[in-house]
Amino acid sequence: MTPEEIKDLQEKLAAANREKEEALQLIEEQNKLIDTQAAKLENAVAGFPVVSVDGQAYELRLKSFTYDGQLLKSEDLKDDSEIVKALVAMNVGWIVAVGVTKKRGK
């Protein structure tokens, strides 16, 4: 093989490796989304609302609560909202992690 052919093959290999890493990252993101949605479906039967924060699903085991002087309903909270993030950070007892997002192997 000529040096040019070797260089061309090395460039093709590097490009293929970049594409592989991008594909693996996309697969990992999709798996997190699938796990979160599955947790939501599993817990919908129990009647507790489920929200997600950074790919982790949380079950809200309280119908309503007071936060920052406002009466809020758990069912009205949205995924990744600032209120949910703050409550998760505060480790309130009525927010329970469910459907733990699994790290998938590469």
Image: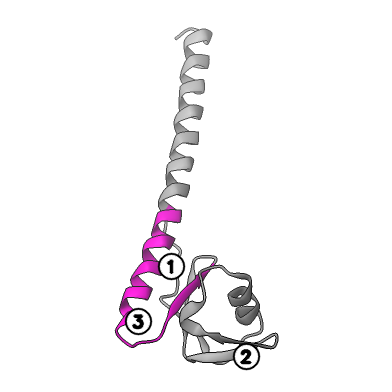
Tag 3: Cα neighbours inside 10 Å, few (<14), some, or many (≥20)?
some
- Given the image, on which type of amino acid does mark 2 rest? Thr
What is the quadrant of residue 68 in the picture? bottom right
Q: Which residue is found at the position 36% from the left and 62% from the top?
A: 34
Q: Which residue is found at the position 46% from the left and 19% from the top?
A: 9
Q: Is residue 35 magenta?
A: yes
> Disc 2 marks which residue?
66
Residue 102 circle label: 1
Disc 2 is placed on an element classified as strand
Disc 1 is placed on an element classified as loop
Q: 55 or 17: which is nearer to us? A: 55
> Disc 3 marks which residue?
43
Q: For the residues carrying marks 3 and 1, which lies nearer the camera in this image?
A: 3
Q: Whole-percent x and y of residue 26? A: 44, 48
Q: What stretch is highlighted in magenta?
A: 28-53
Residue 7 circle label: none
Q: Judge left or right: residue 76 versus residue 71.
A: left
Residues at circles 3 and 2 in contact by the CB criterion of under 8 Å = no
What is the quadrant of residue 43 in the picture? bottom left
| Residue reaching furthest to the front | 70
Badge 3 or badge 2: first in the primary sequence: 3
Q: Whole-percent x and y of residue 91? A: 62, 86
